Amino acid sequence: MKRKFLEQLQDWKKRNIKEPLMIIGARQIGKTYIIEKFCKENYEKYIYLNFEDITKLSSIFEHTLVPKEIMSQIEVLIGEKIEIEKTVIFFDEIQICEKAITSLKYFCEAKENYRIITAGSLLGVKLHRFETSFPVGKVRILNMYPMDFEEFLWAIGEITLAEEIRKCFNQKKPMADILHDKAKQYYIDYLYVGGMPQAILNYIEHDKNCMLLERVIHNSIITAYIADMRKYTTSGAETIKINEIYDSIPRQLAKENTKFKYNLVKSTANRRDYELPLDWLVASSLVYKANKLERPETPLRVFVDATNFKVYLNDVGLLATLANVSYQDIQLNENNLFKGALTENYVAQELKSKQIDLLYYKPTQTMEIDFMIAQENQVIPIEVKAGEHIKSRSMSNYIMKYKPAYAIRISARNFGFSNQIYAIPLYAVFCL
């Protein structure tokens, strides 16, 4: 499957960046696949070492952090000489060995140009709970996400449709009705399938028929996430709280005001007891946090209110499964309230995959802008609608009060521009 992330790996090689790569992302998003593809296509020799599969691999780093000595011991382990200038080494599930992470500093500082790539399913959690000295400035950290809608189209063979969507976006012109309808239907399918590569492969194997999609794939991924919660937490009590928060997210998003509320996790929950478990979920990349913006001015990060926020799942397909939403429930012509929650989560997922901070603006009870982004030092409001009904007092009031250069409305409607609002179809969010 073609992934945009490959470009970041190729840039690391092309620029001969000295720092080892550290890839952070949730389980089952395709990290190992894309890293292996890159390594095999770009280097003469490739060594793969997994800290989970080789249980005593950590012992090498317990004895030494000197790169030459580490390489010497790996040579003995694999039974062959390592040609440094021709070889890339991929340490997978490196979060298991803290000293291996510490060793990356010395690989970076070494005279030799070691090509080291690391990854791990819960590496983000490990970095937040690092007990010794993390090699700050000596590691190039990259974040990877589930497949976005454009990658989904590539995977199912709709490359020309993706190109046409980009063309219409750039030219600010509507898609032909027949193509608009086709893209909308694939968007609906994506809400159900999501961006997990295994689920997309299953969709393809069933001739792109969502009615035949095996939901066991999503359930297995969720089960693996829950198993990770048990494996990489400090106590059983913390695991329970993490799981409770994760299970509550469909309920959090189903209400009209989607601000995260601890009492929706359970009636006795409070911030003091559940803040750290929520941080665990964010660090693990299983959920994304959207903070409230206090005022629509740049730089946006300066005006964040971190005490008020929303929480989204990292994948809309997992959200649909967790909420037990049927495929019929999310058809565009169906009046299903949770469809709005799926749509908002989808947009959050698309923005996050572009490394865009998730921010929303709610200055009053009657005004709320779903997402706020900065473009060329301008604050741009984004409104999200699940269907074709686009009337919104919030957006009208915002434009009247703050007079942005333009606003964006994402809905089931075709491309267009009127009254300072750029209309973008739901299937074209990846173009932003």
Image (cartoon, grey):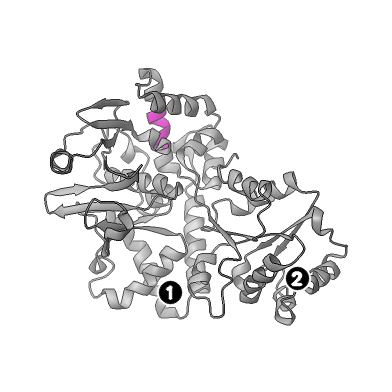
Magenta region: 182-189
Q: Is residue 203 visible?
A: yes
For label 1, the crowd category at 10 Å Cα-Cα, with few meaning under 14, some 14 to 19 and many 20 or more, is many
**Pointer 2: what residue?**
67
Depth check: give the residue in front, 105 or 185: 105
Q: Residue 239: which disc?
A: 1
Image quadrant holding the C terminus, namely: top left
Q: Residue at x 59, y 71 (%)?
A: 135
Residue at 54% x, 52% y: name it. 29
| Residue 219: % across, % down | 47, 55
Quadrant of image for the N terminus: top right
Q: How many labels does the image show?
A: 2
Label 1: which secondary element? helix
Secondary element at image label 2 = helix
- Taking the magenta stretch, the answer to whether it contains residue 185 is yes
- Residue flagged by tag 2: what amino acid is it? Pro
